[in-house]
């Protein structure tokens, strides 16, 4: 699994949650964004799972073994019965028994495939009932799960067919072989997966165009494109900041505004300094749109995340995930953690291993936040969720972290003894 991609997606999910809490996006926009991110996380997990041994693979191997044992036993019984027959009837009876064996194989194949389909459908339905999702969300998830289920079923069918072909070759050429081959062709044809043109709007992509998926996940599915207005965006960032990633937000912006032109500016440049002063920018990365964004198709749905300053539009810190408060005093080797009382024990389990590694090299402060202090902290550092970590009094990151994750982020900004060591990567 691509660790960095997964972390970016999880950070994007937290960003959506913060945006929803800050009322910069609607509940509907949050649900759509969440659905898209969870789908990508699920795809990453599926790709990783393909390289590992899974219960489904074990099930398929066990199924093949059972079929082979049953067929071998049936062939043995047939041969014993043929030996008992009179010599003149031996050839005729042998041919009949071979045909019956093939019919038994075909029937067992069909029955096993149907049982596997029914089992997977029941598992998916049980999962949907437990999660108790809204009706529309359940429908969309069911579509995705059926597609994934079909892939396993079809894979199982192909393995079983290969087993059938293996026994067919061993049986030599006998009457009924053409019928079996024809059956194999029909099974292979039925196993072909139908893939519609699109499932979601995000499947419809064309340079400079905004795509919409009509009749998604059907034979009539097709992409419809509209030309979008040109949009200018300047991104101010510190190029040396390892934790100031802009790729996640840029990806979202490019999906909303496909005809966008993005210009990256280092915060130390003259152009950036003028914009920072003019627009009173306090945190990086900063995303600044020109006024032509108002002509874009998706502007109305996105404008709640924007703050108008003169003739420009700036994404709010809580919506952009800006995490580098560059105007604050830098204090090397300092780590602050802001958390609520209910999660203190959970954080300590992972944090103590980090502190034990560096001992007195790190200046550490724990802040237990009450309801009264949350508003003030939100205004000062844009913190709306807990826990949140602050490195060197300037750069923040959030979420429950493993000891090794805290170490890697801290060491990316500080060079101290112990950074080369590995800590537990699991969250305790």
Image (spheres, rainbow, N blue to C red):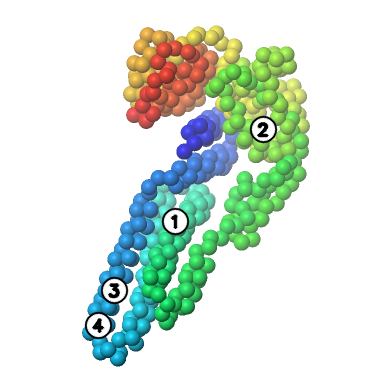
The 10 Å Cα crowd at callout 1, few under 14, some 14 to 19, many 20 or more, is some
The Cα–Cα distance between marks 4 and 2, rounded to whole angstroms, is 85 Å
Residue 347 coordinates in the image, percent (x, y): 37, 24
Earlier residue among tags 1 and 3: 3
Q: Can the viewer see residue 95? A: yes
Name the residue: 42% across, 61% down: 159
Earlier residue among tags 4 and 2: 4
Residue occupied by mark 2: 303
Total residue callouts: 4
Q: Tell whether 356 sits left or right of 145.
A: left
The secondary structure type at the circle numbered 4 is helix
Q: Nearer the viewer, mark 4 or mark 2?
A: 4
Q: Tell whether 150 sits left or right of 130.
A: right
Instruction: Return the mark for residue 83.
Output: 4
Q: Are marks 2 and 1 in contact (CB under 8 Å)?
A: no
Q: Nearer the viewer, mark 2 or mark 1?
A: 1
The secondary structure type at the circle numbered 3 is helix
The answer to which of 211 and 195 lies nearer the viewer is 195
The 10 Å Cα crowd at callout 3, few under 14, some 14 to 19, many 20 or more, is some
Residue occupied by mark 3: 74
Name the residue: 53% across, 60% down: 193
């Amino acid at each position: 699994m691509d660790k960095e991609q997964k972390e970016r997606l999880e950070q994007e999910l937290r960003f959506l949650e913060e945006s929803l809490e800050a009322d910069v996006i609607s509940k509907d926009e949050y649900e759509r964004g969440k659905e898209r991110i969870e789908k990508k996380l699920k795809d990453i997990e599926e790709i990783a799972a393909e390289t590992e041994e899974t219960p489904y693979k074990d099930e398929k191997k066990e199924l093949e073994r059972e079929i082979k044992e049953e067929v071998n036993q049936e062939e043995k019984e047939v041969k014993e019965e043929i030996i008992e027959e009179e010599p003149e009837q031996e050839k005729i009876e042998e041919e009949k028994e071979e045909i019956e064996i093939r019919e038994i194989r075909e029937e067992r194949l069909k029955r096993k495939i149907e049982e596997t389909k029914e089992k997977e459908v029941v598992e998916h339905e049980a999962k949907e009932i437990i999660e108790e999702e809204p009706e529309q969300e359940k429908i969309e998830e069911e579509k995705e799960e059926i597609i994934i289920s079909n892939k396993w079923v079809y894979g199982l069918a192909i393995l079983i067919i290969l087993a059938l072909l293996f026994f067919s070759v061993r049986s030599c050429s006998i009457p009924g072989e053409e019928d079996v081959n024809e059956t194999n062709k029909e099974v292979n044809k039925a196993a072909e997966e139908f893939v519609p043109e699109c499932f979601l709007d995000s499947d419809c992509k064309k340079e400079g165009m905004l795509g919409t998926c009509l009749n998604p996940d059907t034979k009539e599915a097709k992409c419809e494109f509209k030309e979008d207005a040109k949009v200018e965006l300047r991104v101010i960032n510190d190029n040396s900041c390892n934790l100031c990633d802009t790729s996640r937000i840029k990806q979202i912006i490019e999906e909303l505004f496909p005809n966008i032109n993005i210009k990256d500016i280092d915060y130390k440049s003259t152009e950036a300094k003028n914009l920072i002063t003019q627009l009173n920018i306090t945190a990086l990365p900063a995303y600044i749109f020109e006024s032509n964004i108002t002509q874009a198709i998706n502007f109305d749905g996105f404008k709640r995340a924007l703050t108008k300053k003169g003739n420009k539009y700036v994404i709010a810190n809580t919506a952009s995930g800006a995490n580098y408060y560059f105007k604050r005093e830098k204090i090397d080797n300092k780590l602050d953690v802001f958390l609520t009382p209910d999660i203190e024990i959970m954080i300590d389990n992972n944090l103590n291993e980090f502190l034990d590694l560096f001992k007195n090299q790190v200046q550490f402060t724990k802040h237990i936040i009450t309801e009264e202090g949350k508003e003030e902290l939100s205004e000062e550092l844009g913190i709306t969720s807990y826990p949140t970590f602050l490195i060197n009094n300037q750069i923040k990151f959030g979420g429950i972290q493993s000891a090794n994750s805290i170490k890697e982020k801290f060491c990316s900004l500080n060079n101290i003894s112990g950074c080369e060591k590995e800590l537990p990567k699991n969250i305790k």
